[in-house]
Image (cartoon, rainbow, N blue to C red):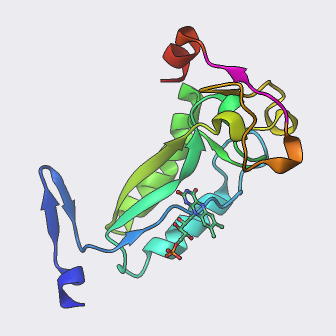
Amino acid sequence: MGYLHEELIVNTLKLRNRLVMAPVATEKTTGDGRVTNEHIDFYKEKSKNENIGLFIVEHSYISKEGKASPKQISVADDSDIEGLSRIAEVIHSNGAKAVLQISHAGSAASEEVTGMRAIGPSSVPNPRKVYFQRQCAMMTLKNCGQVC
Ligand SMILES: Cc1cc2nc3c(=O)[nH]c(=O)nc-3n(C[C@H](O)[C@H](O)[C@H](O)COP(=O)(O)O)c2cc1C
């Protein structure tokens, strides 16, 4: 266990220990993808006791058709930077580091959440989403460029 509490330096990244918090989708936006005070309270509470060296902040959608759930955080627009910075600041102020998990739900996205048709690597319905067995649109090269 002692080793876990040793500092870790990776190039310019210096972690106070080797304990990493796995991403946890908190579903704390109001539906618009924006960071709320509830997120700040959550990450403040988790980082306050100096237990964790690195936080992987919850998966956040990189474009609207790839939104996975109604209250997921958005990283799809420059206007999201301000709220996301607040999460980084609260984690940094407690001495830990933060990275953000970015995601695109692909064929697992539902029209009910996004208001848009899902796009994925093929038009085959997502086998894990049995409750909406509908085809998604196969991504074009242009789509790939927009998503990446
Ligand atoms: C409520 C909840 C939200 C989660 N959100 C994410 C997420 O945003 N991204 C992700 O990769 N994993 C997510 N996970 C998976 C966890 O990060 C973790 O990998 C999983 O709970 C297994 O952890 P364990 O092996 O320590 O039990 C979530 C899990 C739970 C229970």
Of residue 28 and residue 67, the one placed in the foreground of this image is 67
Looking at the rendering, the stretch of residues picked out in magenta corresponds to 134-139
Looking at this view, name the residue that lies furthest to the bottom.
1
Up-down: is 44 above or below 83?
A: below
Q: Report x, y in % for residue 125.
A: 76, 35
Q: Report x, y in % for residue 145.
A: 49, 14
Up-down: is 77 above or below 125?
A: above
Q: Find residue 21 and report its image quarter.
A: bottom left
Whether 128 is among the magenta residues is: no
Residue in the picture at 52% in, 11% down: 141
Q: Find residue 14 and report its image quarter.
A: bottom left
Looking at this view, name the residue that lies furthest to the top.
142
Q: Is residue 127 left or right of residue 113?
A: left
Most common secondary structure along the magenta stretch: loop
Residue in the picture at 56% in, 50% down: 59
Q: Report x, y in % for residue 94.
A: 37, 69
Up-down: is 143 above or below 16?
A: above
Q: Quadrant of ligand 1?
A: bottom right
Of residue 41 and residue 6, the one placed in the foreground of this image is 6
Q: Is residue 74 left or right of residue 55?
A: right
